[in-house]
Structures are given as C-alpha cells and as structure tokens.
C-alpha cells in the first residue's frame, strides 16, 4: 500500500523535533571584586595581616604574578597579559601606588588594595579584560 505524498509530508511536519544544540566554547565575561595579592610570594609574616587574608601576600613592587582574594576564601590568579595590565593600573592608582610604596618603605602592609576585575574565568585563571584599582 502506498502512502500519498501529502500524508508523508504531514507526518514529517507533525513529528516533534529535538532542538538542535550547538555547543559553543564562548565564555561570558564576569566581574570579580577582591583584595589584590601577590600569587608568586607565599612567605609573608604577621606584618601583612591587616592588608591581606591569612596565607596570602600583598602586592608589591617586585610582584610579577597577581591574583584576587575573593570573599569566601576563594581566589583567582591573572593571566600573563593581565599581570602587565595590573602593574599599569597600580601605577595610575594613587591609593594602590601609595600602598605599595608604604609596604616597600616600612616592610609592613597596612593598607588593603582592592580591585574590580572583569574577564573570562578558565579554571582558576582570570583572562583579564579590564581592572580598576580602588
């Protein structure tokens, strides 16, 4: 028995179709606010207790790898290009530059350097798009 073409087309049109999903590797930018830290240096003492969370070291003139200590104890580190942007942002920020200078001069970090960063998170590394030092 032959099915008329119209009936076959109608059956195809009426059959529920699964939506076509397109896997994309595009990540959305996120905003992070936290305390700027030196992720390379891990041996800081009590002289920095007021400036960074326990176990972290404050940003300094010698720092080349930076991160953000976030609320809840989490932290993110910045990608290589982001580290260069942070150095530039610290130079432009009066508060940030003063905090680093005071830490260098006295050996005590007493001022918290807070930053707002926007970027794409890959694992625990933030691919930095923009940074603002408070």
Image (cartoon, rainbow, N blue to C red):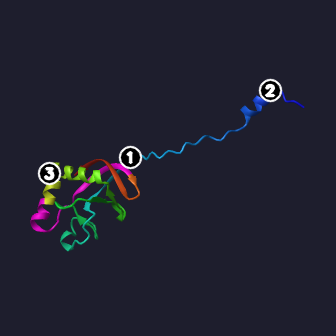
- The spot of residue 126 in percent (x, y) is 35, 54
Q: Quickly name the residue at label 2.
A: 5
Q: Secondary structure at mark 2?
A: helix
The residue sitting at 62% across, 40% down in the picture is 19
Q: Is residue 18 left or right of residue 9?
A: left
Q: Is residue 113 magenta?
A: yes
Residue 73 occupies quadrant? bottom left
Q: Secondary structure at mark 1?
A: loop
Query: Looking at the image, is mark 1 or mark 3 earlier in the sequence?
Result: 1
Vertically, is 11 above or below 68?
A: above
Is the C-beta separation of discs 3 and 2 under 8 Å?
A: no
Q: Nearer the viewer, mark 3 or mark 2?
A: 2
> For the residues marked 3 and 2, what is the alpha-carbon distance in whole angstroms?
77 Å
Q: Quickly name the residue at label 1.
A: 29
Q: Is residue 87 left or right of residue 21?
A: left
Is the C-beta separation of discs 1 and 2 under 8 Å?
A: no
Q: Secondary structure at mark 3?
A: helix
Instruction: Magenta stretch: give its range.
Output: 101-120
The residue sitting at 33% across, 53% down in the picture is 32
> For the residues marked 1 and 2, what is the alpha-carbon distance in whole angstroms?
51 Å
Q: Nearer the viewer, mark 1 or mark 3?
A: 1
Nearest the eye: 62 or 92: 62
Q: Is residue 88 left or right of residue 125?
A: left
Q: Quickly name the residue at label 3.
A: 94
Return the mark for residue 117: none
């Amino acid at each position: 028995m032959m099915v008329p073409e119209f009936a076959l087309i109608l059956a195809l049109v009426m059959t529920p179709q699964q939506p076509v999903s397109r896997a994309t590797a595009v990540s959305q930018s996120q905003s992070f606010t936290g305390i700027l830290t030196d992720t390379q240096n891990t041996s800081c003492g009590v002289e920095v207790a007021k400036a960074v969370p326990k176990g972290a070291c404050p940003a300094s003139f010698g720092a080349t790898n930076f991160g953000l200590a976030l609320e809840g104890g989490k932290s993110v580190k910045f990608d290589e290009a982001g580290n260069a942007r942070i150095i530039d942002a610290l130079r432009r920020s009066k508060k940030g530059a003063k905090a680093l200078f005071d830490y260098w001069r006295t050996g005590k970090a007493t001022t918290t350097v807070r930053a707002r960063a926007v970027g794409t998170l890959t694992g625990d590394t933030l691919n930095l798009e923009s940074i603002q030092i408070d």
